[in-house]
Image (cartoon, rainbow, N blue to C red):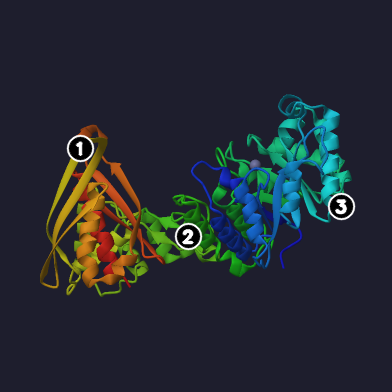
Amino acid sequence: MPTDRVQLYDTTLRDGSQMEGISLSVEDKIRITRKLDELGLEWIEGGFPGSNPKDAEYFRRLRTVELKNARVAAFGGTRKPGSTCETDANIQSLVAAETPGVTLVGKSSIYQVREILETSAEENLEMIADTVGYFKKLGKTVFFDAEHFFDGFMLDPDYTLQCIATAARAGADALVLCDTNGGMTTRAMLAAIGKAQERVPDVRLGIHCHNDAGLAVANSMAAVEAGVWQVQGCVNGYGERCGNTDILTMVANLKIKMGLDVIEDEQLARLTEVSNYVSELANMVPNAGAPYVGASAFAHKAGYHVAGIMKDEKAYQHIDPLIVGNTSRVLVSELSGQRNLLMKLQELEIDYPLSQDEIRALLEVVKEKESQGFQYEGAEASFALLVRRSLPGYRAPWELEDFVIVERRRRSMLGETVNEMLAEAMVKIVIDGQLQHTAHEGNGPVNALDGAVRKALVQVYPQLENVKLVDYKVRILDSQAATGAKTRVLIESTNGSSYWTTVGSSTDIIEASWLALADALEFALTAG
Ligand SMILES: [Zn+2]
């Protein structure tokens, strides 16, 4: 059972989806809801049915979804000035969502009431009282999100406190204090929380922070320490501008650092998985530096640290990464010595007995490659191949004989203006002693090359049908050399169940891409 001391409230599907670059389908939202339910969160804010039809559709679909832990809230504003709840379309869309909870955002800053809402102080209080009361009569759990609470408090504390006291009298189950602009410092925030606690001692408080000052998690932690009950946040800290409180960091902090059993240990062990799952569906590149769940969160680089880690894992990490489902990772780089390399081999489960000389030789190869612009820290599949290729008896699944790429730009076709680029690749590769010759057209040279190579390979290795490239990154290494600069290409691939990254480097972007692509396909055939 979760503790009653703190309640976790996720708003990834509403506030988090405001982030630039995120667009979630109804199906994505349902899948994320299930995942957050498995994680053990108590409330999930599903969306804003009054603002978009997709969210209304989500609430319809949700009725057939069974959740084990979480309840879902629909989000909307207080009724419009000078109207009634019964006639307000947004209020009625919240009713139609048929959720056990509603979260009502209301103005709690006199400046916002007068300048943005353009109504009177009294009417805003009426709107709060009416709307909260309306949903309480319908038997819902009602959370009142006091928008701009802290900014309003600085301006006119009496009015701001009156807003939350009004929601409390109307029966709100919790009063959520929002740092809507995300600019509060911790001390000023705590002072305002103290006044809110004095004014409404009998109603639970919540905290909703934005990260514009980089303090969202720190402020939310401080609020909980000050006695605040509900914590709102988003997976991976998603949210508009600089994001919201990262609810996954909060979960880990509350449980590990504060000893509050907000979720079970087994659920905590899935934290990293949940983070990756949501970034996948949101189509966001995972933040390697994210606390607890990032790929770099327990990665060790300098040779000196690694020597310490070899002696005792606790020496240079604040927790055991397994608690949150993450793993220690040793970065191979020119800084590191033989010990790093050995640990890396262990991690990749390459347990061939390498002699001292072989290890030294391998390290030389890594250093040589790194000086050419390869980088294995983000490209473990290429590293694994580098090691395998150095082992006696390794046979590559195919060899490239030759490729030709033709690029053409044409202005018109059959009298019509098209202004299009065409790329065609012709490839000769040897598989099992057989020379295969294929050609493929693509929307660019790498795409065409990829198509041509696969065409040859899938005849012998049908499992490559499932392998997709999911990300392609190009970095210019010495940009002062301008068009003569070295290029590093990173390619991320998946077969649907696992992901791997490969690297290529060259002054020729096609060659760099080819090297990364060839590794990606070779890894798919030789891994596991
Ligand atoms: Zn917000």
The residue where tag 2 is placed is 315
For residue 112, side relative to residue 512 (left or right): right
Mark yes or no: residue 52 visible.
yes
Q: Amino acid at mark 2?
A: Ala
Q: Amino acid at mark 3?
A: Lys
The residue where tag 3 is placed is 137
Q: Amino acid at mark 1?
A: Arg
For the N terminus, give its image quadrant.
bottom right
Name which of mark 1 and mark 3 comes first in the sequence. 3
Q: Position of residue 163 (x, y in %)?
A: 82, 37
Mark yes or no: residue 372 visible.
no
CB atoms of marks 1 and 3 within 8 Å:
no
Name which of mark 2 and mark 3 comes first in the sequence. 3
Neighbour tally class for label 1: few under 14, some 14-19, many 20 plus, Cα within 10 Å = few
How far apart marks 2 and 1 lie (CA) works out to 61 Å
Neighbour tally class for label 3: few under 14, some 14-19, many 20 plus, Cα within 10 Å = few
For residue 448, side relative to residue 282 (left or right): left
Name which of mark 2 and mark 1 comes first in the sequence. 2
Q: Please tell me the numbered disc located at residue 410.
A: 1
For the C terminus, give its image quadrant.
bottom left
Of all residues shown, which one is farthest toward the front? 415
